[in-house]
């Protein structure tokens, strides 16, 4: 078996690669990685330097491949989003369907396709829920990727599987996602409260208790990168994954009220209540638990404790890469 991987130098890819190479189930598999701006250095990985927008390069990279894991993405850069994000997905699918011996195409999707906290749902979000992206080209590209994978299954009978993940956490990400002084991710506090309030909360090291559009504590979906990698490894070559879309999320969304209560009780941190226009949603992972036998191991308490206990080395900066 030969696995072709994109996005191997990203957050998920960096955690997936050592787990894949160490997994006994994949002993004997070989791995080829498509890299462009950044290159992974590992003796067990064959590197192809190319852009996903290069159709000829994608056909060449697919030679001998049995499985594809597509994790690369382009963020808010409209031109690249269309040329590399959408065009790259098309090139990969065309090469995959045209190459003899290919067996499975796995796509790492995102809950931006259902709008996560920007769209309101009155019931849990399953794989059957309508796609309702929030504004922006990144969310649009992820919707188009899901649709393309689905249609290639209908049109050409390829075996596709989409793993739809929410915000992916590792190391101390979650701690700084809640920070008023060095925020990681968004939306930025400046869009919700004034600069004076941000400064006061930063000085007090407060914990944000976000409230949703209805006034209840906001519930937002997360997944720890270890659990996502576990889901990818489980889905690869799994017969029950054929033609399926799975939500890969924690068993319950993170409740900002529970987070504030826990950190107040365990670390005596003050709480800052903030009203937002966002919607509480529940990304239902029941299908993945049922068909794949996968279950997340990192619950809310573990998510918090891992983030607060983690000490980041000086040569390990927290980065968000744009584009892709």
Image: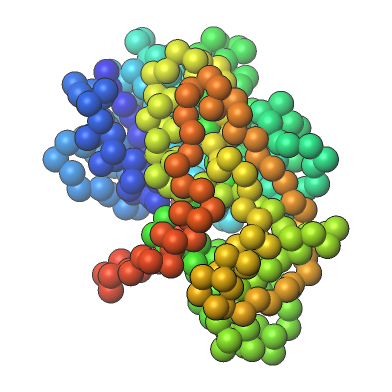
| Residue plotted at (44% across, 33% down) | 231
- At 62% from the left and 13% from the top, the residue drawn is 154
Left or right? Give the position of 274 relative to 271: right
Where residue 22 sits: x, y (%)?
Answer: 22, 35
Query: How many labels were placed on the picture?
Result: 0
Residue 291 image offset from top left, x and y in percent: 53, 19
Instruction: Tell me: 196 left or right of 310.
Output: right
The answer to which of 105 and 301 lies nearer the viewer is 301
Left or right: residue 155 compared with residue 38 = right
User: Is residue 13 visible in this depiction of the protein?
Assistant: yes
Vertical placement of 124 versus 272: above or below? above
In the image, taking residue 154 as reference, residue 308 lies left or right, namely left
**Which residue appears farthest toward the right when viewing the image?**
214
Question: What is the basis of the colouring in this image?
Answer: rainbow
For the residue pair 183 and 67, the one nearer the viewer reads as 183
The quarter of the image holding the N terminus is top left
**Height in image: 304 above or below 181?**
above
- Examine the rendering and report whether any part of residue 80 can be seen: no
| Res 24 → quadrant | top left
**Is 199 rendered above or below residue 301?**
below
Judging depth in this view, the residue of 14 and 323 nearest the camera is 14
> What residue is at 68 percent from the left and 62 percent from the top?
257
Determine the residue positioned at 51% across, 48% down.
299
Residue closest to the far left: 43
Residue 198's x, y, as percent?
65, 83
Please, is residue 131 above or below residue 62 in the view?
below
Residue 46 drawn at (x, y percent): 21, 35
The residue nearer to you, when weighing 92 against 8, is: 8
């Amino acid at each position: 078996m030969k696995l072709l991987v994109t996005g191997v130098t990203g957050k998920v890819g960096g955690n997936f690669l050592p787990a894949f190479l160490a997994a006994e189930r994949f002993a004997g598999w070989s791995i080829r990685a498509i890299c462009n701006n950044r290159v992974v250095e590992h003796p067990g990985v064959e590197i192809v330097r190319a852009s996903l927008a290069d159709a000829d390069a994608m056909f060449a990279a697919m030679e001998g491949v049995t499985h594809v894991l597509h994790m690369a993405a382009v963020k808010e850069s409209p031109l690249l989003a269309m040329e590399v994000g959408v065009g790259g997905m098309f090139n990969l699918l065309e090469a995959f369907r045209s190459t003899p011996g290919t067996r499975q195409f796995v796509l790492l999707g995102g809950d931006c396709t259902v709008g996560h906290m920007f769209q309101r749902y009155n019931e849990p979000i399953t794989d059957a829920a309508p796609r309702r992206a929030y504004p922006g080209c990144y969310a649009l590209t992820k919707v188009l990727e899901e649709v393309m994978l689905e249609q290639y299954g209908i049109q050409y009978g390829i075996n596709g599987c989409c793993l739809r993940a929410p915000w992916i956490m590792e190391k101390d990400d979650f701690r700084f996602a809640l920070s008023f002084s060095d925020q990681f991710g968004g939306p930025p506090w400046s869009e919700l409260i004034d600069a004076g309030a941000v400064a006061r909360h930063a000085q007090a090291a407060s914990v944000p208790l976000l409230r949703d559009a209805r006034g209840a504590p906001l519930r937002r979906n997360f997944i720890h990168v270890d659990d996502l990698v576990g889901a990818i490894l489980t889905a690869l070559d799994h017969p029950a994954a054929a033609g399926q879309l799975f939500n890969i999320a924690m068993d319950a969304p993170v409740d900002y009220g529970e987070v504030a209560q826990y950190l107040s009780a365990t670390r005596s941190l003050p709480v800052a209540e903030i009203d937002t226009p966002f919607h509480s949603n529940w990304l239902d992972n029941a299908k993945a638990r049922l068909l794949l036998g996968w279950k997340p191991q990192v619950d809310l308490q573990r998510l918090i404790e891992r983030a607060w206990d983690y000490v980041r080395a000086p040569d390990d900066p927290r980065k968000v890469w744009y584009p892709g």
